[in-house]
Amino acid sequence: MKKIVKSLKEVYANSTKKMQKDLNKANIMQIPRIEKVVINTGIGRITKESEKVAEVYDSLTAICGQAPIKTKVQKSIAGFKVREGQDVGIKVTLRGLKMWDFLTRLVNISLPRIRDFRGLKISTVDSNGNLNIGIVDHTVFPEIIAEKVKYIFGLQITVVSTAENKEEGELLFRELGFPLKKSDK
């Protein structure tokens, strides 16, 4: 029997009344919602290896369904051996339907595929109610064919919400089905 996965957008729409009651908000527009998702990876070590940079760029494009942008150094720092204008990272900002599709795949497919995954620590939700996840191996995403990968890289995912504090953010992510632990132990 196939399990049909509900879109996180549907889950959010169905849980707005419950969140309004739990947070004791007068207006439904006051409940927290997700604004955007930012996926970021550093390429500082491999900047000179154009083949690896191209693979990272193509992999992020496949994972997100949208072309990423390269981030550049703002100021030269000799200690870090970086010069102004040099590429040091690649990032994608997702909004709207692409954001909801990505979050649905992340929660239902990618996070469970992480080796020894036992849930996200509560400390991944910051004091502003945003969720920050670090993924060491990008091959957990179903869009990546592990046999064809030559270079494995990590990425950082930030889910930006309109929550006013950590408690509201935690409630939002629990309602959406993010696997948050009960405590940081």
Image (tube, rainbow, N blue to C red):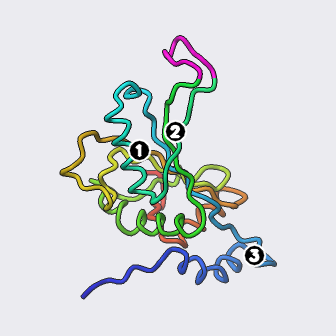
Q: Nearer the viewer, residue 61 or 3?
A: 61
CA gap, disc 2 and disc 3: 42 Å
Disc 1 element: helix
Q: Which residue is mark 2?
A: 70
- In the picture provided, is 113 more to the left or to the right than 130? left
Disc 2 element: strand
User: What is the span of residues highlighted in magenta in the rendered image?
Assistant: 75-84
CA gap, disc 1 and disc 2: 9 Å
- In the picture provided, is 67 more to the left or to the right than 129? left
Q: Residue at x 54, y 64 (%)?
A: 99
Q: Amino acid at mark 2?
A: Lys
Q: Confirm or deny contact between disc 1 and disc 2 (CB under 8 A).
A: yes
Position of residue 62 measured from the top left corner of the image (x, y, whole percent): 38, 56
Q: Residue at x 49, y 40 (%)?
A: 90
Q: Which residue is mark 1?
A: 57
- Position above or below: 81 against 148: above
Q: Confirm or deny contact between disc 1 and disc 3 (CB under 8 A).
A: no
Q: Residue at x 68, y 67 (%)?
A: 32
- On whether residue 31 falls in the magenta region, the answer is no
- Extreme-top residue of the structure: 78
Q: Amino acid at mark 3?
A: Asn
Q: Which residue is mark 3?
A: 24
Question: What is the crowding at mark 1: few (fewer than 14 residues within 10 Å), some, or many (at least 20)?
Answer: many
Which secondary structure class fits the magenta region best? loop
Kindly identify which numbered label has been placed on residue 85: none
Question: What is the crowding at mark 3: few (fewer than 14 residues within 10 Å), some, or many (at least 20)?
Answer: few
Q: Nearer the viewer, residue 168 or 134?
A: 134
